[in-house]
Amino acid sequence: MKRKSIKVEKVLPYSILTVIGVLFLLPLLWVVVASVDPNANSSIKVPSAFTMDNFKSVITDPVNIRAFIIGLLLSMGQGLLVVLVAGLAAYPLSRYQLRYKKPFMFTILFMTSLPITAVMVPVYQLFIYMKLQDSLWGTMFFLTAAGLPYAIWMLKNFMDAVPLELEESAWIDGASVWQGLKRIVAPLMIPGICTVGIFTFSGSWGNFFVPYILIQTPEKLPASVTIYQFFGNFGMVEYGKLAAFSIMYTFPAIVLYIFSQRFMSQGFSLGGASKG
Amino acid sequence: MDAHPVISSSTAVDGGSSSRKKQNRKLWASALFLLPAWLLLLIFFIGPILLTFYFAFTNLSLTGSEAQSTQFVGFSNFLNMFQDPNFRISVMKTVIFLLFSAIIGQQVLGFILALLMKEKNPAFRRVIGIIIIAGWVTPEIVVAFCWVAFLNDSGTLNALLQQVGLKPVAWLFTFPMASVIIANIWHGTAFSMLVFQAALDDVPKSIEEAAVVDGASRFQVLYKIVLPMIKGSVVTNMILVTLQTLGVFTLIYAMTGGGPGTSTQTLPIFMYNQAFVNYQLGYGTAISLILLLIGVLVSVLYLKSMKVKV
């Protein structure tokens, strides 16, 4: 009797986890199977044949290519700007004793947690006043500002981990503060910079709401919005193409996530963020 | 940027400059380093927040006579809002969505996953982990497609039900709120799981073992030892997940559009409809302000729970 209960105790977690795993896998599996099925419908089934036509028709459509390129430029531009601007801001916050540092960092942390959704109506109005509506540059700057609080907070903490002595020895050799930052601090922070950059890129690559509100011209829309329109127009008929489009659109996010794992060895300890 | 004389000259480590001069240079350098961030935050982040407070008290509109002359209307947007049955419905829908998809769904499922996966076969742990995280990494809009297809009249779920002899259900029409809640749990659980995995890893094994030696059951160990030790992570995670879920727009918009009727019209959807479908920007901003204030309240709790040292 005793032995049997131990066996159940061992097997039970595995069975529960397997059931949860299968339930989580089912909705995702459909996209993968439907994308290579010439007669895909909304239910998972063994494809009648294997085809790459769905992918081909998505890739060969110039409208989709343009949307992907716009999305890439928007997200990469934002990622670079965020890392650059936040990296600069992080330097004095990490290195100098500043009078207003504490309230500033608190404001930054506070801003990281505010829901961006809530400000989109006034942002739209602001864009009209500034004649930025329908502007990809304006959208990029707004996304940059929205990503800054998190990036400043993270990069400041990463920079704190770079010992000051290394920089000081460079100064003695005649390097300027700027050179020290560029040649000594930045290279040592590559993991942190990549983490923040990837996180920022993925966030805006997957962001539908912001460009949906701020961009009106169809030719300027990034992939996140065109895929929604595709769904609205053809989604209920051409499941295979929608699935292929979805996979191509999800691909960068997954690749970057895997890539970022190499930098995030520390993982998810929420305690880590409180080390100031 | 290379050419900033202020920054390069502030490096005079061996120069005879007085410490006050040095301090001044540091101040200048900091100001320059912080300037781009400040400008962007001021224009595109703090600006819109301040504008929220202003527009919420105007009759700003995209069409009609109000579009020409925007006027200050005092609290009338808020008075209208509190009398608007749609607003009350939206608040209720938001509370239900938050409670079931974030606070209960993602947290409890994330915790169960983390707990069960502890000390299991590494390969098995990895496979399950990848499946759960895949739902998290997938962009919200694709998550919506996956679930629309899954719950569709002729979707996978109904196909499975028919296999076991049950009648198909129009899930998105009959149970719209449950549908978006389940989709959001699917999308968000990985975050809670990762947080709880990290927290559980920090619980020393020796303490648990000592309790077992003293005759504690597994549930007693969980309730009396493990949970109190990871309380901090639970609170912080709950707040972060609440904040994320409060802002969810895309998932609901793409799955149900807030419908049928008002059955999935959470505050972000209600705000969007008033501002961009009915063109009542002033009213829409008043709803934004409510959303923002809820966010501020939860954020303050977050800062308190973190006990941050800056």
Image (spheres, coloured by chain):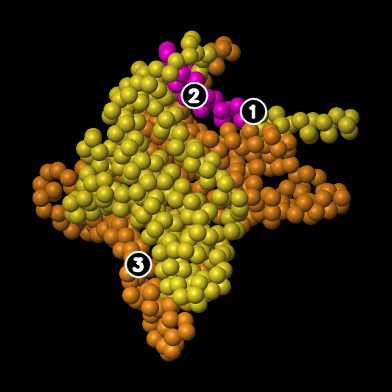
Q: Which residues are magenta?
A: A21-43
- Colour yellow belongs to chain: A
Task: Give me the disc on residue A32.
Answer: 2
Q: Is residue B124 magenta?
A: no
The label nearer to you, 1 versus 3, is: 3
Whether residue B163 can be seen here: yes
Give neighbour class at mark 3: few <14, some 14-19, many 20+ (Cα, 10 Å).
Answer: few
What residue is at 74 percent from the left and 42 percent from the top? B119
Disc 3 to disc 2, how far (Cα)?
A: 49 Å
At mark 3, the secondary structure is: loop
Is residue B297 something one can see in this rendering? no
Residue A207 in the image, given as x and y percentages of width and height: 38, 42
Q: Are marks 1 and 2 on the same chain?
A: yes
Q: Which numbered circle lies on residue A19?
A: 1
Mark toward the start of the polypeptide (1 vs 2):
1
Label 3 resides on the chain identified as B
In screen coordinates, is B87 left or right of A151?
A: left
CB-based contact (under 8 Å), mark 1 and mark 2: no
Is the residue under label 3 in contact with that under label 1 (CB below 8 Å)? no
